[in-house]
Amino acid sequence: MAYHTIHNEVTGEYKEKGSRFLAYVKHIENEQEAEEYITQLRKLHHKARHVCYAYKTGFQNPVIRINDDGEPVHTAGQPILNHLSKYQLTQVVAAVVRYFGGILLGKGGLIRAYGQAVENALVNAKIIECKHFVFFTFQTGFEKYAILQEKLRQFGAEFTSTDFSDTCSFTIRAAEENAGKIKAFLSENKINIIEKQP
């Protein structure tokens, strides 16, 4: 399965009625990275009124989070997420820091401002297409090593680690679309998968 993300961290800015909206968009690998990035921004902009965000990570059961950080419900996190969706991005976090200018913008003004700040950042982004890989770890006898290696490589698998201590232990990486074929092949050859990682 292919997905789109951004290659470079990008920033953008939008101003309205004295308020400044600073957008930051970055590639992430998981939820922890997203939360750590948001924490860093909160420390960097500790005088800001709001740090609102949205992120999407994961594939089979994606994690999607939005946060309005004190703004009226769905006026910040949701428009940020909408712009990530517009570009069909995943594995990405977007946060918008607001420095309040003293004039209330209303719900419509906030939705426009948070969305436009992210848009102003994304126009600078290098959007890339990536493949989602799955990893399998399994064990087998030494006698099957050569046959397995040849066949699995026909399925586009890459051997990322091997251990020849007591038995042959392997970890392979393969594109998600080939995962079913690999599982079927291993099952036919009575090879148990020790671990599968998304």
Image (cartoon, rainbow, N blue to C red):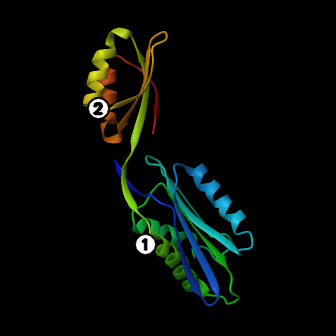
Query: Considering the numbered disc 2 on the image, is that residue within a helix, a strand or a loop?
Result: helix
Q: Relative to 135, is 53 above or below?
A: below
Could you classify mark 2 by the number of other residues whose Cα lies within 10 Å: few (under 14), some (14-19), or many (20 or more)? few
Query: Considering the numbered disc 1 on the image, is that residue within a helix, a strand or a loop?
Result: loop
Total labels drawn: 2
Q: Amino acid at mark 2?
A: Lys
Residue 163: give x, y in percent of width and height.
46, 18
Residue 153 placement: quadrant: top left
Q: Relative to 135, is 163 above or below?
A: above
- Image-based side of 118 in relation to 181, left or right: right
Q: Nearer the viewer, residue 150 or 181?
A: 150
Residue 134: give x, y in percent of width and height.
41, 37
- Taking the spot 61% from the left edge, 87% from the top edge, the residue there is 105
Outermost right residue: 47
**Going from the N terminus, do you reach mark 1 or mark 2 first?**
1
- Image-based side of 178 in relation to 60, left or right: left
Res 181 label: 2
Q: Relative to 120, is 35 above or below?
A: above
Res 123 label: 1
Residue 97: give x, y in percent of width and height.
63, 72
Real-space Cα separation, disc 1 to disc 2, in angstroms: 39 Å
Q: Relative to 2, is 18 above or below?
A: below
- Image-based side of 133 in relation to 165, left or right: left
Residue 159 placement: quadrant: top left
Could you classify mark 1 by the number of other residues whose Cα lies within 10 Å: few (under 14), some (14-19), or many (20 or more)? few
